[in-house]
Amino acid sequence: MTPRPAPSRRHFLGMATATPLAVTGALTLGAGTAYAADSAYVMCYFTESTSLGEGTDYGLHLAVSKDSLNWTPLNQNNPVVTPTAGALGLRDPFILRKQDGTFVVLATDLKGTDWSYVSQYIHVWDSADLRTFTGYRRLKLHDMNTHCWAPEAFWDAGRGQYAIIYSAVNSSGHNVIMVNYTTDFLTASAPQVFFDPGYDVIDGDMAVGVNGVNYMYFKKNQTLVGTRSTSLDPGSFKEFTTGVAHGGTEAPTLVKSLTSSTWYLWGDTYTPNGVFYAWQSTDLASGTWTALDQKTYTQPLNSKHCGITTITTAQYDNLITKWGAPAWNRLKSYNLPARYIRHSNYIGRIDEYPIDPPSDSQWKLVPGLADPAGVSFQSVKFPTRYLRHYNYQLQLDVNDGTSTFSADATFYRTAGLADASWASFRSYNYPTRYIRHSNYVLRIDPISTTTERQDATFRVGY
């Protein structure tokens, strides 16, 4: 969930106090279940720009990945479905693959940043394949004067039911993690308190049945903290880690690698930053995390509060076929990976993400104007303009149709000079020079040193 002020004192009236059922039988992985054939990942999110202008949309967005670190937004980073009831917008979406292999999508009933809006409902969709979404409804979780933020769900094998967890305010005036149980996401049991350590907690994310232990990470004091329990009983989870954070961080998302023993923990910084950071661990039980270098992962453009689920190769391919990969790219700096190529006042440079408006950092890599074997960088925001060099500095100019312009705006893509899996761009008409950044400004220069090779290396992604 994104940042909000301290909650007002809202009371749970008539809260169910039934004793939880005992968990029996083996625990099975619920949220984030990995099937034997899984080989890829799907992320759901909403989008929000720094100014809440261009690039902001409170519908359901999807992206796919083969490694869970670098993502391809679907449908040109536009929503694939949008709520038609309640606040007419969503936040904090979550995808659960159910026991029958189909999917259910849950989300907060809230559009924008009106934290005073109170809804006792969450948005729900059914989907067989994440290409079509059916049965849209809002599911009521309680009758209390409080919200239902950041819903997630997991399969509780002992109960033979799905648990829906979410953040709401208790009678002491602080957020706790609540739970309702359901078999069909059409109706739900009375709410119970799932986790209340006595202080404000939101954004619970589960990893169920990991070597017989269940884990839940949540936001505490702007950090991500882990709890664990050998049961799934409400009240059984106990904190066991110190906080992980990069500045103010929320919306933890636990992801298990499909090819190694590595776990990833994603976190989301507050609006207006909206930056994802990631940590890794090879032992979830240790509770220790190491920050990943930002060059190893790239979030979808303007993404906020994500959920990540594993899928098969066929599902990955079908999603790309249905929704399409973006017709544009973003280019990340190798040695300053928080920065992306953008234009500002028609000057080419690298600046830190998020860039507002986001279209300043979006490019179409089209066949080279002087040689179709090369590439030219066409601005998404100003499609008549291209990056070209002038006095060795890159600027965004209108194509005047001359051979000089075409030559200045054409580059040959090569293996990255600092990392062959990345890319470098050699000038068409000054073939000893490459695009590089210098004091954050883009220019073409001869390249000889290690630093210059790093300055001239970029990741072409989304």
Image: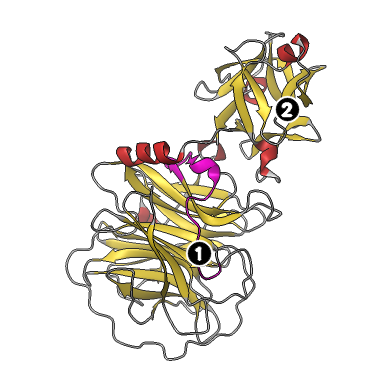
Q: Is residue 309 visible?
A: yes
Q: Is residue 67 visible?
A: no
Label 1: state its secondary structure: loop
Q: Are marks 2 and 1 in contact (CB under 8 Å)?
A: no
Q: Quadrant of the N terminus?
A: bottom right
Q: Earlier in the sequence, mark 2 or mark 1?
A: 1
Percent position of residue 229, x then y: 32, 68
What span is colored magenta in the figure? 63-87
In the figure, 7 relative to 270: above or below? below
Percent position of residue 136, x then y: 41, 63
Kindly identify the amino acid type of the residue bearing the numbered disc 1. Thr
In the figure, 370 relative to 421: above or below? above
Residue 290 magenta = no
In the figure, 320 relative to 263: above or below? above
Which residue is the site of mark 1? 84
Instruction: Tell me the tag on residue 384.
Output: 2
**Image quadrant where residue 207 sits:** bottom left
